[in-house]
Image (cartoon, coloured by chain):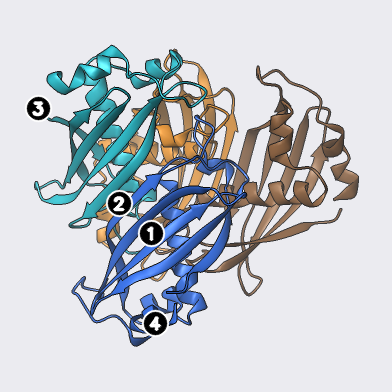
Chain colours: A orange, B blue, C brown, D cyan
Amino acid sequence: MIEHTVTVRVRYGETDQMGVVYHPNYLLYFETGRTELMRAAGVTYSEMEKSGIFLVVTETACRYRAAAKYDQELRIVTKIDAVGKATIRFSYRVLGPDGTLLAEGHTELASVDGSKNPVRLPRGISDLLSKS
Amino acid sequence: MIEHTVTVRVRYGETDQMGVVYHPNYLLYFETGRTELMRAAGVTYSEMEKSGIFLVVTETACRYRAAAKYDQELRIVTKIDAVGKATIRFSYRVLGPDGTLLAEGHTELASVDGSKNPVRLPRGISDLLSKS
Amino acid sequence: MIEHTVTVRVRYGETDQMGVVYHPNYLLYFETGRTELMRAAGVTYSEMEKSGIFLVVTETACRYRAAAKYDQELRIVTKIDAVGKATIRFSYRVLGPDGTLLAEGHTELASVDGSKNPVRLPRGISDLLSKS
Amino acid sequence: MIEHTVTVRVRYGETDQMGVVYHPNYLLYFETGRTELMRAAGVTYSEMEKSGIFLVVTETACRYRAAAKYDQELRIVTKIDAVGKATIRFSYRVLGPDGTLLAEGHTELASVDGSKNPVRLPRGISDLLSKS
């Protein structure tokens, strides 16, 4: 299983008064992680939505190990854990500038059509597991 | 011109590492202010969207006077400055728990249909100026 | 175990282009849930921070069952699952206007001092488990 | 007056149910614009804060011309309008992928110390006007 890495720089507004990244914002980094993994593998999620298929998050979890700070460049390391007919599961590690593990988590998504009915994942996505 | 007041409590995630509310979040409070003014005057914006008319923000501005802090109950005082055929302008003052002026600003909105073409403001809104 | 319920109204900015609440925002609702449970039980978290004790989130998870929509009044039902010497675990259910379960999850927090070293939970918090 | 350009890609969570970028989020793009202009000119804002000088936003305004959409790469073009002893004013244009002007605005900031008292802008910043 190959991993995909993308870098995000912590924005000021992503911090809170504890002086660190506010915990829900890691889910935004996860989203960037999976979107860029898909793009790198040839699947542009915005195009997928235009074609009428949506990935909705059905479950997410995150363990926080150490704090990320303003202006740090974080590495989001994403891999695909499993792909079903209409579901996909990604896992993530967020690393600080020195390689420290800051957080890790996963997200399960379901593919649905515009009426929120389950539909098969597009071929490109199903193939990601082997590619990524 | 009568004003409408609504209270919002500052959430943890709305602060930043300076220990105060991150400045763009006042625009969220403004939105709550105008939405609740409209509701109090009998116009539910969510219903308006369902009927196919959208209010899009065309301009906004804010002057910051003093910092709002976590868990404070802020008063958002909203009034309507002007109503045109397809535009409306709200102004806002954000007051701290002791009545201090923390911020003031305004927002201009245009009414459009689902294709983003200008449409007349619904009657209920046009009437707000006299009512509010 | 008694539960605490607080209502939040979905803000426009909390939606995304799928027309529903963007999934990380449920963690903000969870935060409101635990903060208000604590306040109802006599512990004001903002005062706790002023006294030098911080609750940092060490783990969170959420399962999404159905979509929350703009302007809906959601009920956040919070309870305390467990209290340790320096940790506390809350669980949450988010209910829609008609009582439908929209999401459920939990959060684990650790109490630390200003240097991020673990410290005993303040007495008021330790007592919450029996009270709440 | 030279301008600085930085690219940001619109995140999913930055959209709202109108299918476009939620208007307060342009202020986040402005922040990225001025932070990167400063960094390009040799002033790292995060270092400035560590040295005890903070830039607080005292005024901001934005005019919205056309909608930015999910996954678009936006260009944030930033320049410095004026630098005073303890104040600085930036202006911004946000351009879509095809160069269309989507939004324009400005921000005024004041330099303060940790007690929120005005202090002289650090030399590096005062020099930006001529450099940028």
Mark 3 Cα within 10 Å, few/some/many (few <14, many 20+)? few
What amino acid type should be assigned to the residue bearing mark 2?
Arg
Work out whether B23 lies above or below B60: above
What amino acid type should be assigned to the residue bearing mark 4?
Ser
Q: Would you identify the image quadrant in which residue C116 lies?
A: top right
Instruction: Residue under label 3, please give it.
Output: D2
From mark 1 to mark 2, how far is it between C-alphas? 8 Å
What amino acid type should be assigned to the residue bearing mark 1?
Arg
Which mark lies nearer to you, 2 or 3?
3
**Chain under label 2?**
A
Work out whether C129 lies above or below C19: above
Q: Secondary structure at mark 3?
A: loop
Identify the disc placed on residue A123.
2
As drawn, is B112 to the left or to the right of A130?
Answer: left
In the displayed image of the protein, which residue is found farthest to the bottom?
A: B123
**Chain under label 3?**
D
Instruction: Residue under label 4, please give it.
Output: B130
**Chain under label 4?**
B
From mark 2 to mark 3, how far is it between C-alphas? 47 Å
Task: Report x, y in % for residue B34.
Answer: 43, 66
Mark 1 Cα within 10 Å, few/some/many (few <14, many 20+)? some
From mark 3 to mark 4, how far is it between C-alphas? 48 Å
Task: Report x, y in % for residue C98.
Answer: 63, 75
**Chain under label 1?**
A
Identify the disc placed on residue A120.
1
Q: Secondary structure at mark 1?
A: loop
Whether tag 2 and tag 4 are in contact, CB under 8 A, the answer is no
